[in-house]
Image (cartoon, helix red, strand yellow):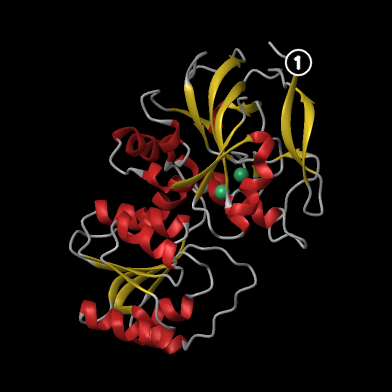
Amino acid sequence: MKKQMVAAVFEGNGVLQLRKKPVPAVSREKDVLLRIEVASVCGTDVHILSVPPGHPANAATILGHEYVGEVIDAGNGVTHLKKGDRVVVNPNLACGFCAYCRKALPNMCENMTTLGIFIDGGFAEYNLAPCDALFAISKETPLEEAIFAEPLSCVLNGIRKLKPLPGESALVLGAGPIGLYFVSILRMAGLKEILVSEPNSKRARMARKMGATEVISRGDTQLEEIVRARTGVGADIVIDAVGALMKEAVASARKGGRVLLFGMNSRAMAEIRQNDITRNEIEIIGSFIANATFPATVSLLESGRLNLKSLVTHRFKLREIHKGVDAMRRGEAIKVLVDPNE
Ligand SMILES: [Zn+2]
Ligand SMILES: [Zn+2]
């Protein structure tokens, strides 16, 4: 096997540099060495590479937390995987012993670290990951579908809390990648009205393709009126996939409706009349990353029923990764694939 590999390393201050790095080797009994089959650029990578950064990351780390790999080597303690398996990766590694891990909330782990953000990830030819992070997926599942595992597992965590009922109505605020995954899952769940609010016409088109019954692009004050006109009393479910639209979300929900706050923006402040939530019994639900949702995610991807590969808008070789980051930064890409194989 090769001794050196190409990797995209975060150097701090918005710099992502292609470098030669040694191919990592299995040293601990739960280690798994992966050959990366495909990776993808996430919005979080763009935040990491902004100046000032919108998301923390460790300098000198190989970025890339969304990737699919083939098992090349494994330590003696790895029992659920074998050489040649294709795996998807839960990059968020929980400690297993803190107060939250022991309350079955590993997504709230107080000692969490993340592959591709704080320790080396998948923008490389090879990656070393702990076996707990890895889930085998059928090789019949195309890479262009398997690559969606990580964000989809986070979306399923939100869906589990929302408990959408067939026939209900939903409003999804924002048709970026996350909003689009929600739309396709809600369609599959049998919702009647799936309204989407999205000003960008390209994304609006994509939302219709994924199952939105109507895309609303008008101003916020009209939004509530349109939602009320379509649903009678307001949406049963409202999902803020942007992370700064709590006010609009609460105003568009019916009395007793559920609002899922999913998008992340640590600077957004919502001005809300608290009494509207009290008086209307609005249920406000937060959801962060995945929690035990990888098994269902893998099954769903293997079923081939979601057809997410139509959301792949860009493909680049690893050496062209900057073009991929730029496409994400400009907001013109939905899913950018990065292929480390020359
Ligand atoms: Zn991500
Ligand atoms: Zn923990």
Quarter occupied by the C terminus: top right
Q: Is residue 262 above or below residue 308?
A: below
The one nearer the camera, 12 or 89, is 12
Q: Tell me: 90 left or right of 10.
A: left
Q: Secondary structure at mark 1?
A: loop
Quarter occupied by the N terminus: top right
The reply to whether residue 193 is in sight is yes
Q: Position of residue 128 (x, y in %)?
A: 66, 26
How many residues crowd mark 1 within 10 Å: few (<14), some (14–19), many (20+)?
few
Q: How many marks?
A: 1
Q: Residue at x 32, y 52 (%)?
A: 185
**Quarter assignment of residue 146:** top left
Q: Is residue 194 above or below residue 93?
A: below
Q: Residue at x 19, y 59 (%)?
A: 166
In the image, what residue type sits under mark 1? Lys
Q: Tell me: 98 left or right of 153.
A: right
The one nearer the camera, 164 or 277, is 164
Q: Tell me: 213 left or right of 68.
A: left
Q: Position of residue 152 (x, y in %)?
A: 43, 47
Would you say the beta carbon of the disc 1 residue lies within 8 angstroms of ligand 1?
no
Q: Position of residue 284 (x, y in %)?
A: 42, 71
Question: Given the current orientation, which residue lies at the most extreme left position?
Answer: 167
Q: Position of residue 58 (x, y in %)?
A: 77, 46
Q: Is residue 260 above or below residue 273?
A: above
Q: Residue at x 35, y 87 (%)?
A: 279
Q: Residue at x 47, y 23 (%)?
A: 86
**Quarter assignment of residue 329:** bottom right
The one nearer the camera, 280 or 136, is 136
Q: According to the image, label 1 marks what residue?
A: 3
The reply to whether residue 121 is in sight is no
